[in-house]
Image (cartoon, rainbow, N blue to C red):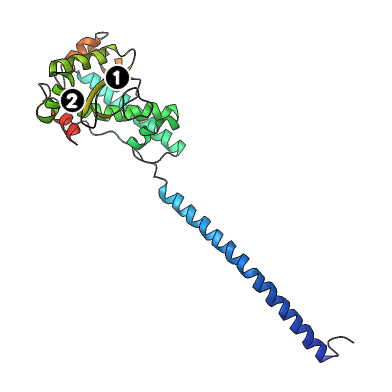
Amino acid sequence: MDNKQNPSNSRRAFVKTSAKAAIISAAGMPLMGALSSCESKKEEKKEEAKEVKPQVETFSQIALPYAFDALAPNIDAMTMEIHYGKHHAGYVKKLNAAVQKEQIGGSLEAILANVSQYSTAVRNNGGGHYNHNMFWQVMSPNGGGVPTGKLAAAIDQAFGSFEEFKEQFSKAAATRFGSGWAWLVKNGTQLSIGSTPNQDNPLMDVAEIKGTPLLNLDVWEHAYYLNYQNMRGSYIENFWKVVNWEEVSKRFES
Ligand SMILES: [Fe+2]
């Protein structure tokens, strides 16, 4: 006899099936709940990761704060034009390509602080961009003379006198073998002088001298060769006539 023929058997079968379904459903609830909670935590983590990953920036040169010939005769117009328009522009273009390719987000300063984690392209072109953007600003057609105020006092305290400071900085620039930069940096209120090879700078975790850059001098041959040929010393001597002490003071006091 089948269930169709016996209504009481049919009811019994329905009750059994419903009870099984209820047990399975009840047992499954905590598991489903745990799975659902796990998925939502994964989603939250994904969201967090999205939030903390800084955006890949597009870097650009500052507008040159003066005309190409404004620093002449200390730095000639053609050197400035090629230096700014070809060399610096090249670093920026290659830096942008490198951070895009490697998907490196964040400010240039943050990238430089962890530069050992990235490629040589990021190190060379990131440094090249930072160093030149700064270099244009620490020079001025109205520059030269001596620093004043708190910066002057800090220089006297650190080096004994402005003349002594000039001598030490000039020596750092003159003795940097090959291409590189001379630097005046601060750590807190403490000033120090040093130099870096290639396009390294004191913001880099790999740098030989670390600190906040206040003054820099480019001693790559591209910075002086057209006018000074091999006479790096003369270029350094004339650099002092265009140093923008107002800008250096601003950096010191910030
Ligand atoms: Fe340069």
Question: Which residue occupies the foreground of this view, 242 or 16?
Answer: 16
* Position in image of residue 228 (x %, y %): 23, 11
* Position in image of residue 79 (x %, y %): 24, 19
The residue shown at (15%, 26%) is 154
Residue sitting farthest toward the top: 230
Q: Name the element at disc 2.
A: loop
Q: Amino acid at mark 2?
A: Met
The residue shown at (9%, 29%) is 149
Q: Name the element at disc 1.
A: strand
Question: Which residue occupies the foreground of this view, 225 or 102?
Answer: 102
Residue 32 can be seen in this image: yes
Q: Which residue is mark 1?
A: 195
Residue 104, picture quadrant: top left
Residue sitting farthest toward the right: 1
Q: Is residue 91 above or below residue 176?
A: below
Residue 70 can be seen in this image: no
Q: Earlier in the sequence, mark 1 or mark 2?
A: 2
Residue 89, picture quadrant: top left
* Position in image of residue 112 (x %, y %): 36, 32
Front disc: 1 or 2: 1
Q: Is residue 104 above or below residue 122?
A: below
Q: Which quadrant contains ligand 1?
A: top left
Q: Which residue is mark 2?
A: 139
Q: Amino acid at mark 1?
A: Ser
Measure the C-alpha gap from mark 1 to mark 2.
Answer: 18 Å
Mark 1 Cα within 10 Å, few/some/many (few <14, many 20+)? many
Mark 2 Cα within 10 Å, few/some/many (few <14, many 20+)? many
Q: Quadrant of the N terminus?
A: bottom right
The residue shown at (13%, 19%) is 162
Residue 175, picture quadrant: top left
